[in-house]
Amino acid sequence: MVPGHAIADFKAYASRALNKAEPPEKRWARGGNVRALSTKAVDAAVRYVVDGQGEAMEVYVAQGGSD
């Protein structure tokens, strides 16, 4: 799958789910970054999204992964 298509698919799926749960509102910026990241960079990006943007959000933490 092309990364840009994956972003568009994710946004569409998430928007449909959110619109069912809440009144519709704008949630996404246009585009998205599709560059490849190392594992360390992915960890840093996740930490930024979860902890570095102000008010806390809900987070799914996988249990018992295979490292």
Image: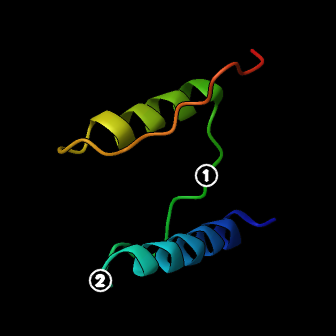
Question: Foreground residue, 48 or 33?
Answer: 48
Location of residue 65 by image quarter: top right
Q: What element carries label 2?
A: loop
Question: Which quarter of the image is occupied by the C terminus?
Answer: top right
- Find residue 7 and name its label: none
Residue, x 52% and y 28% (percent of image)? 43
Q: Residue furthest front?
A: 21
Q: Badge 2 local density, few (<14 within 10 Å), some, or many (20+)?
A: few
Q: Where is residue 56 in the image (x, y as percent from the top left)?
A: 24, 41
Q: Where is residue 9 in the image (x, y as percent from the top left)?
A: 65, 74
Q: Name the residue under label 2.
A: 23
Is residue 45 positioned above or below 24 on the image? above
Q: Which of disc 1 and disc 2 is earlier in sequence?
A: 2
Q: Is residue 43 left or right of residue 5?
A: left
Question: Foreground residue, 66 or 42?
Answer: 66
Location of residue 27 by image quarter: bottom left
Amino acid type of the residue that numbered disc 1 sits on in the rendered structure:
Arg
Is residue 4 positioned above or below 51 on the image? below
Q: Name the residue under label 1.
A: 35
Residue, x 78% and y 18% (percent of image)? 66
Q: Which of marks 2 and 1 is in front?
A: 2
Q: What element carries label 1?
A: loop
Q: Badge 1 local density, few (<14 within 10 Å), some, or many (20+)?
A: few
Residue, x 64% and y 31% (percent of image)? 38
State the separation of the CA atoms marked 2 and 1.
33 Å
Q: Is residue 19 left or right of residue 53?
A: right
